[in-house]
Image (cartoon, rainbow, N blue to C red):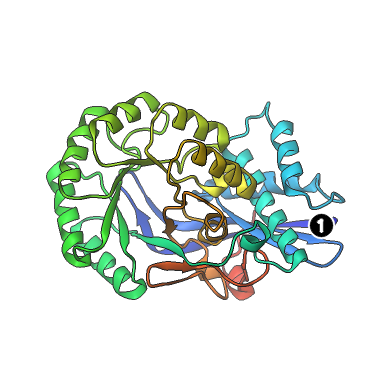
Amino acid sequence: MIIRSITIRAVDAPIDPPLRNSLNVIPRAPLVIAEVQTEEGPCGTAYAFAYAPAALGPLAALTRNIGAGLIGREVAPQKIWDELLNANRLLGAEGLVMMAISVLDMALWDALAKGAGLPLARLWGGDLSPIPAYGSLRGWGPAMLAEEGGRAVAAHGFRAVKCKLGAPTLAEDLETVRALRAAVGQEVEILVDYNQGLDRPEALRRGLALQEMGVRWLEEPLHVTDDAGLAWLSAQLDMPVQGGENWWGVTGMARSLAAGATDLCMPDVMKMGGATGFLRGMALAGAYRAPLSSHIFIEASAHLLSVCPLRNYLEHLDIAGALLREPLRVEGGMALVPDRPGLGLDWDESALQRHAANA
């Protein structure tokens, strides 16, 4: 198939409820949507999450400019991915550059699968078996997280939930975990995420206390670049250290795994370089025997995890669902991979127009 045109759209929709952690509150989802129209008819689409409204315009412009150079090319995602990374290496294949390459890559894969009439999972040689998912909670503090966690388990049957920690004192964090445990019951695993908010001594102190409470994993306790500190911490704890959502591409992932900085890994498809980067990262995780989960981008992640031999969990944190006609479904704690060609994204045009941004 040949690329006829690439359209870039920007939307800025509210996140309800907002995402909260110890460092900030994210009340909105500024998304860049790429649409790759082929000469043969299929149109591939995907989205990137700019995180901050101030980054929405620059990301949309960069994606539009990079995409313009692909007009007339064959839809060949892996070949194009390598070329785009090499072309932007001097600029730095991280940050907005990697995000722009990622959304274009995912849209190209979507178009290719639609042309074949297959869900991406099947195009990659997987099947549509349900994927284990955990509920990624958005609240903060004992009362809010207990209510949200109990509701998530009741509604979706999650067998694991994750909460954000990082209160001023360890006692407050332990109170949050106790309240969440009371709400979800003894059979549901509890995962915790510090969003890089601790120093080394405090990470060890809180990690030891949390593992005594049966917490399943300790996510991003230290800064993502502190490989030595994370490896040291992992060696002190029986509880696994989780990380990876802030790796930029396979290079960042390789550096961390080689340092022993994480026991588990959860790359982000947008920061890894789209589906192509994620697929290459899965091979790396396999070499290190590191169980792999996904980070947000639930629609693409469901297809990717279908071909992951060391699959752990899909993080269910829905960023784009309010803009889709049919969001990804979760039943009995399992994400259901849609039996539709491509990624299965079907945008609600009225919602896109309602939240359209001038970018």
Quickly name the residue at label 1: 5
Residue drawn at x 79%, y 47% is 68
Which residue is painted at 35% across and 40% down in the image?
Answer: 220
Q: Residues within 10 Å of mark 1 (few under 14, many from 20)?
A: some
| Residue at figure coordinates x 61%, y 67% from the top left | 345
Q: Amino acid at mark 1?
A: Ser
The percent position of residue 324, horizontal first and vertical second, equals 56, 71
Q: Position of residue 330 (x, y in %)?
A: 44, 70
Direction from residue 78 to residue 141 in the image, left or right: left
Question: Is 215 on the left or on the right of 50, as rendered?
Answer: left
- The structure residue drawn at horizontal position 49% and vertical position 40%, both measured from the top left corner, is 285
Q: Quadrant of residue 195?
A: top left
- 117 above or below 300? below
Q: Is residue 201 above or below residue 182?
A: above
- Quadrant the N terminus occupies: bottom right
Work out whether residue 180 can be spotted. Answer: yes
